[in-house]
Every structure is written in structure tokens, then in C-alpha cells.
Image: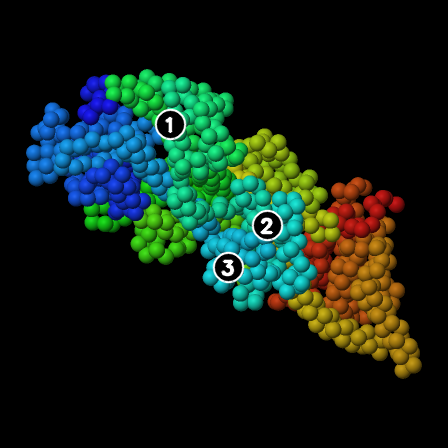
Amino acid sequence: MNAFRHEGRATLSPLQVLAERDRRQLALARYAILDTAPEAEFDAIVQAAAAACGMPLSLINLIDIDRQWAKAMAGNGPAELPLSASICVLAVEQDDVLEIPDATKDPRTADNPLVIGEAHLRFYAGAPLKTPAGVAIGTLCVADDKPGQLTEAQRLILRTLAQQVVTTMELRRTLRQHQRSDHRSRAILDSAIDYAIIAMDLEGIVTSWNTGAERILGWTPTEMCGQPAHVFFTEEDARDGIPEREMGAALLHGRGNDERWHRRKDGSRFYALGEMMPLKDEDGAPEGFIKILRDRTEQRLAAEKQRADAEFMRSVLASSADCIKVLDLDAKLTFMSEGGQRVMEVSDFNAIKGCPWPSFWQGQGNADALAALEAARAGDVGHFQGSAATMAGTPRWWDVQVTPMLDADGRPERLLSVSRDITEQKAAEQRIAASEVRYRGLFEGMHEGFHTGEIIRDAQGAAIDFRFVEVNPAFAKQSGLPADTAGRTMREVVPNIPQWLIDTYARVVGTGESEVFEIAVPQLSRTFEVRARKSEGERFVAMFLDISERKREEERRAALIEVGDRLRNTSERAEIVSAVAEITGRMFGLSHAGYGAVDPERETISIEREWTAPGLTSIAGVHKFRDYGSYIESLKAGEPVIINDVSADPRTANDAAALGAIDVRTLVNFPVMERGRFVAIFYVTKDGPYAWSPEEIGFVSNVADRTRAAIARVEAEEQQRIINLELSHRMKNMLAMVQSIATQTMRTAGDVDTARNVLAARLIALGKSHDLLLGGARSSTPLRGLIEEALQPHTDRPDRFVIEGPALNVGSKAAMPLALMLHELATNAAKYGALSTSDGRVMIRWTIDGENINSRVQLGWSEVGGPLVVPPTQTGFGTRLIGRGLAGSFGGEVELSYPPGGVICTIVAPLKDIQAGDTPYSAG
């Protein structure tokens, strides 16, 4: 064997050198090992190399872009060198160990500072540290200040230890990736503070308790971990075995639903929706449960990723071993290390000695093994990864490198195969991938918006912006931001974002204290509750919960309270309508809102006062329904009319221009019915299309009902006031009537007995008249009979009254007002007019104009023979009842005049109103 071998690969072009350097820097960055503290695993390797090779100095040197840095050192050597003084730079260009017996005689090193300087380096041997991708990132080297030479066994040990260095760095990288994945998953779980996420073992003992569980249930993780889950179930559920049933359902069906009362630490109860699911190990066997609860709101499926066991990873690192084999050129086994036999579970090497090594591999693994052998026979290095079972049938993954062992002439005489057990590394990668899939599914599938951000500060340290690191689809949808927002800054996507939002996130990062606040997105008509917490460094996580409907419900509830307060303190109809319209208009941003009286026969609405949005013209006045659409029949039937867009709805499309002229593009009409008759309407409108939600329609319906109730209350109070006045007036009239009857009776009676009998008869007749006025039981009565019965108390002689007119029935609606009016006229005549003298008379005549339902009735009352009439200077209650209240109630018009000869009263009313409640009039 040559004592001076340094053949390397073919000379590389400048571009290839740069590419190789870039690959090396990328590999070193992935390992994150430069400038790290000493570690026992690497220190042990250099000590082993120094001892095995009998050298005073051994180093693990890594080649950076412009320097050589020592990760571990046994002996006294340079911790860092510029690349111009590095001998390891030569070694990384080799495929095998670079050995320089005497550096003073090698032209590449003769003038090296380490050789000619105080170090007096003479011997050097370095094995390249190659990653699984074949990138040389440094060397494991030994050196001496005396010339020397390694034995073949020492060279083998140096190669093996170099591979062990790379194995250790690979496992460190895998462990670091797993830890980062765990940290990110933990951030997700801890940010979900509205969810209690609890992990248990198969016995129901709590093993994990997140921030949301502490917030909802009250116990801290320290208090709950190791305790049975029964403690947060109610006593009765725990007694009935509900926790065990849930765990059984989870094992049997894959999940157990939970919708019941639970108990907090302080003893109070809360109703929660939740699910329980089994936790399974890598083989799919149950190993515990995860329970997810949300306090009185929607439930969400969540699967908590298992955290990696750091102790397990350390045990993998400590127990890893390489299987070192020597093959002849025919690839038959001639040697296997003791550690290799252990890891390959070989009980007797002689049983497999001489067997073809490729036969241990199957399928693609066999093809890769043959290719690696061919590369080694050609003087190159063969490398592949594949799966192969041990001699005991245990399946394992291996990282394999095959290198030639050269003879004295530099030709391959044997082959060295080093198989590194990477089964745990592969399993770790699969767990990381599975964890990433679970995390990504949770991240992308959750309904709540979620993003992570990083604060950006100016030179003075003030927060001026933040960068989106991760954004889930729900957040992009909620915020209206582009789906590719990740990587961009907030001001880049929303230049006018308010500074307070950036300051809030900066405060969370600066103090480490979580904050909850609300933010509105007017473009989406949405309001969100934001829960922000610090992640690490300048980063934070924020979860967005859509509380738009809750805010709208709060606004509707506040508006209804305000309506109640305003109506309770209002006694005027106009004020009621104005207050309700204003609150409703402000609540929904309306163009118009109001309450109007309806004439269903004329199909009109009369609006006295309404609420109109600022800048728009009021629509108070009288309007015909059919000028604005064809929906009045629905209103007459008592059905509400809801039109989201008047230009698209067939009921209003033809009249959209007329509606647009009064600033109406959407409308809601609630009819007010009385005994099946359409009498009023509560309306709201907007000047743009709008889709009314059921909750909003319910609000408008509620307000309409309250408005009608308030108006009915005011009308009832007014009616009660009139009735009270009427009763007072009637009592006075009754006393006057009795006095008048008694006076007239005594004036004409010849003796006391006669006067007593006549007076009794007249008082009985007066009582019958009041029965007619107050009874109201009959549906109709002949007009003549009604007049005669009403005037019976005053008929003291046959010619007192002249009653003339065609046959006519008076309906129940008009009978009472007409009888009261005749009673008032007769009472006034008895007190001041024709009936107050013995010679006075009253003529009552009526006519009918026409013979159909549109005919009109004229009824006249004329007094003669009484005292000289003087027009009254003041209008009494009885006169007001005649003129406005009673006659108006059946559509009549009343005219009272006071000529000197006697009072004249003329009543004109539609025949259909006189007969309301009766069959139509027919002549004869």
C-alpha cells in the first residue's frame, strides 16, 4: 500500500467549485452546527480517533465559506483557520481518506503555515464528512508533528468514525425538526382558549390539560394531570357511569358525543358540547383518549398531536450502531463487525460468511446494492438507502455506503460496506410528516380564522408593521385578504390599516400577556373577536372568532329595550310612530320607516309622520298602494310583504321607477288587522337592495306588534276618557229628563194618583230607551221603531212627534250612535227647546237618494212651537257627541243650525254604513 496517497476526484471547473461550495453551505445551515458549544458525543469520537490512530491530535473540522472551524478537538490544535491555511480543504475533495505522511514533502502543503510555523505539522490524515446526499461538509482528521502512516485498520476506523459524525449530526437535525413541529402544534392548542382540550389514558386519568381547559374549567394543569376525569362531570353523571360510557363509545365507534352539564372547579355548572376520541399509538392500538369541550357554543373536532419523547430520541442516538462489512470483489461477505452482527441480529457469522451481499436486499434494494457495488469497483463511492430485514426477520431501514479498499497499486482489492441503521430516523420522519398532516388539517380545516405574524420595527424600535407568517383559509375568507397573504406585510396588503392594531400586537409581543379585542370589517359587514398571544421572539398568534351575529343580536336587543322605554313614556299616537320609526331606521340604516292608516276600500295609506334618512325627502301624505306594485291583496289577507329588490321582484318590477323616486329599493310591510280587516301598516324601506335575515324580520315584526299595542293603548285610554265624560253627561241628562218628565206630568195631571201613574209609565219608558241605547244586542232594527222607542219618554201626547220616511232597517253598527244622538236631541229639546213647552212639536223625516248600495240617507230633526231659539255661545258635551263622535262613527255628516223658530239637525250618511251588519236595502 502506498504511504503517500492523495488521489482525488477530477479537477473541477470554477463554476463547479462554486456550486460545490453553495451545496456545502446549505448543508451546514441545515445542520445548524457552526459555532455551537462542545458536545460529549463529538468529543468522544475525536478521542476515539486519536486513540485508535495513535495520534496526539484529532479534530472534527467543518469547512465554512471562508474559514475552517473545529466542532471537537482531542489534543492541542487550532479552533479556527482561514481556508488559505486549511489542509482539510484538500481532504473534502477526496472520496476516501486523504493521507499525507510528510507534509514537508507534499507540494500542496510544504509551504502551509501549519507546516512551516510553530505547529510543525508533519503527518495528516482526514476522512471526508459526507451527508446522505453526498455533500462533503468537513473532515474527521488526525495529525502529528512527526511523519507517519496509518495501517489499513486505522484507516477503516477513521472512515467509520467519520460516518458516525455524520450520523450524529443527522439525528440532531431530525430531533430539532421534531421539536419545532411540537412547538408549532403547542402554539395552536394554547391559542384555542375557547376550547378545553384534555388528554387521558385508558383509565380516564388526565395526562394533558390545555390553556382553554384551565380557562373554562378552572383547574390548572398541575392540579388536574394525574387526576381522574370524573371531577369535571356532575355527581349524577359520574354516579351513572357517563365517563366510562363515553370512553366505551369512543373505542367502539371512533368517537363519543358529549352534550351535557359539567362541573367547574368552583362548583358551578356549565353546559358544553364535546366529543371524545381514542388516541392510538404508531401501531394503531388505543393508548388513551382526547376530549374536546366548548362552553355553550359550537363544537369543533380537534385531534391533539402526540409530543415526541426527547428521552426516546436520546436513547435512539445512544444505541445507534453501524454494520461494517468487508466484501471481496465478487461481493461475498468476508467480515462483519461485532456491532454489525448485533444490529443485524446475526447469532453466527460463519452461517452467512461467503454469502453474496446483494442477496440480503429485495426488489429495488437489490438493484441499488448492485449499482453501489459497480461504483465501488470502479473506484467511486456507492451510496443508497433501502429497507432490509435482519437475520431474525426484523425489518429495518439502512443508509449504505460502499467504498473500494485499494491495494498497493491503487486498484480495488476489496470493498467496504457500511450500513447505518436509520430505522428510527425514518420512523421519526414519518411521525413528523404525520404530525404535519394533522397540524395542517387542523390549521386549514378550523372554522376560526388563525394567523401568525412577526412584528416589524423601525430603527428606534417602534412597531410600524407586521408580516404574515402563516394564514389559514378561514382567516383569508373572514378578512377578505388574498389567499397568498403569507410572507407579505400588513401595510402591503392594507396600506391604511389603523396603527392601534399594530400597537396591540406589539404590546402582546412585548409584555407576553394575551389580549382579547374586537375588530370590525365594514366591507364584509362582519365583527370579529380577536384573541392574540405571544409565540416566540417577535412573533405572535391570533385567532379570529366571528361574533357578527352576536353583535347584531345585542344591537337588536338594545333597540327593543329603547323602543319599550320610549313607548312606555309616550301617550301621543304621533310620538309613538315617530319614536319607533326613528329607532328602527337608525338600527337598519333605512331610507324610510313609519306607521300609516289604511283605507282598504280605496286601497290607500295615509302617513302623518315618518322617519326619513338625512338628505332624503319624506313620503308623508296619502299614497295609492297600486302605484307601487301588486302586493296589496297579500296585505289585505294579513300576510307580511318582504321584497329584497323591487326591480327584481315580479310584484314591484313594473313600478320600480316609482319606488326609486321615493328612495325605495327594498321594503318590508307588516299589516295591522282588526277583526279581519286591514286597517294600518308598519313599513320599513332601504334605498338599495338588501337580503333580510329571519332575525331582522322577527325584529321588525316585534316592533310592529309593539307599535300597534302602544297605539291601541292610547286609543283605549282616549275611549275610556270619552266614556267617562259620556257617563257624567248622561247622569246629568237623566236627572234633567226625570225632572222634565215630572214637571210635564204634574202640569197636565188632574190629581195625584193620575200623576203618579203617568209618571211611573213615563219612567218605565225612559228605562226601556236606555236598554236600547246600552244593550246593543240586536243586529238590526227598523228606523221608525228605533226613533219611536228612543223618544217614548217624551211622548206625552200623540202629536208631540211627527215621524215620516220609507221603510229602512238600521244595522247594529249605526243603531247605538243614532239612538244616542236622538236621545241627546230630545234631552236638549226637553230642557231648552220644543219639548220644554206644552205646545211644542218635533218633525223627524228621512229620505233615501237612490236604490243601490251607493245610495245616501238624509235624516232631519226640526223643532217648532218652543221658546225663541238663541244660538249657544259654548258647545256642550252632548252637542260635541252629536257633531263629531256619534255621527262620525258610522260615516255620517251632521249639520246643526239654530233658527229662532226651532233647532234643526240634518244627518247625511251612506246607506251601506247605516245598514252595516244588516242585509242590503231594498225599496218598499
Q: Which mark is residue 299?
A: none
The amino acid type of the residue labelled 3 equals Cys
Q: Residue at x 23, y 46 (%)?
A: 458
Q: Residue at x 71, y 59 (%)?
A: 886
Q: Residue at x 86, y 50 (%)?
A: 807
Provide the residue designation for mark 2. 276
Decide if residue 5 is on the left or right side of residue 332: left
Mark 3 and mark 2: Cα distance apart in space: 17 Å
Above/below status of 592 relative to 231: above
Q: Identify the secondary structure beneath mark 1.
A: strand
Q: Identify the secondary structure beneath mark 2.
A: strand
How did the renderer colour the structure? rainbow
Looking at this view, is 666 or 160 the one in front? 160
Q: Is residue 243 visible?
A: yes
Above/below status of 867 relative to 703: below
- Pointer 1: residues within 10 angstroms few (<14), some, or many (20+)? many
Above/below status of 433 relative to 299: above
Q: Residue 644: image x %, image y %? A: 57, 38
Q: Is residue 15 visible?
A: no
Quadrant of the rendered image containing residue 1: top left
Provide the residue designation for mark 1. 326
Mark 1 or mark 2, which is nearer to you? 1
Provide the residue designation for mark 3. 225
